[in-house]
């Protein structure tokens, strides 16, 4: 979930409601019994089911972990690589400090409120 710092600071209650909804949705998607429905949703904009299935099957993460909302080391590395690539391609003018952009307070509160603090395990390199 992405939010402007100014918005989150001005409207923390609204930001928390959205974070909670995001984590609830991630939890629902991560349930094996919802796999077929998740795949059906993924085809609603016209992507053929066989393409969706191929994408899901080609992922090394488990079904549960593919929907993890955690800012684990692999997720942070992904964003760092993306920022470095966009800088190297001159798509952005300066180096981006990814660690300075990540604020987990709303995610942490949502996980705690929903009793999901230990549901997802952070992926490591």
Image: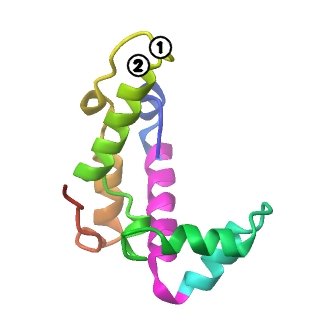
Image-quadrant location for residue 88: top left
Q: Position of residue 78 (x, y in %)?
A: 35, 43
Q: Name above or below for residue 123 compared with residue 33.
A: above
Cβ atoms under marks 2 and 1 closer than 8 Å = yes
| Depth order, front residue of 100/9 | 100
Residues packed near mark 2 inside 10 Å, few (<14), some (14 to 19) or many (20 plus): some
Residue located beneath label 2 in the image: 87
Q: Residue at x 34, y 53 (%)?
A: 107
Most prominent secondary structure in the magenta stretch?
A: helix
The total number of labels drawn is 2
Q: Position of residue 57 (x, y in %)?
A: 50, 75
The reply to whether the magenta stretch includes residue 43 is no
Q: Position of residue 110 (x, y in %)?
A: 36, 59
Q: Which range of residues does the magenta coloring cover?
A: 14-33
Q: Is residue 51 left or right of residue 45?
A: left
Which residue, as the protein is rendered here, is positioned at the far left?
A: 125
| Depth order, front residue of 27/68 | 68
Residue 90 is labelled as 1
């Amino acid at each position: 979930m992405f939010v402007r710092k100014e918005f989150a600071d001005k409207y923390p209650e609204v930001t928390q409601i959205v974070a909670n909804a995001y984590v609830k949705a991630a939890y629902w998607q991560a349930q094996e019994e919802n796999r077929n429905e998740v795949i059906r949703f993924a085809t609603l904009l016209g992507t053929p089911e066989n393409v969706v299935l191929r994408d899901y099957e080609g992922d090394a993460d488990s079904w549960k972990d593919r929907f993890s909302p955690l800012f684990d080391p692999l997720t942070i590395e992904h964003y760092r690589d993306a920022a470095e690539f966009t800088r190297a391609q001159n798509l952005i003018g300066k180096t981006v400090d990814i660690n300075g952009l990540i604020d987990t307070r709303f995610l942490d509160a949502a996980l705690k409120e929903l009793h999901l603090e230990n549901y997802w395990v952070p992926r490591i390199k």
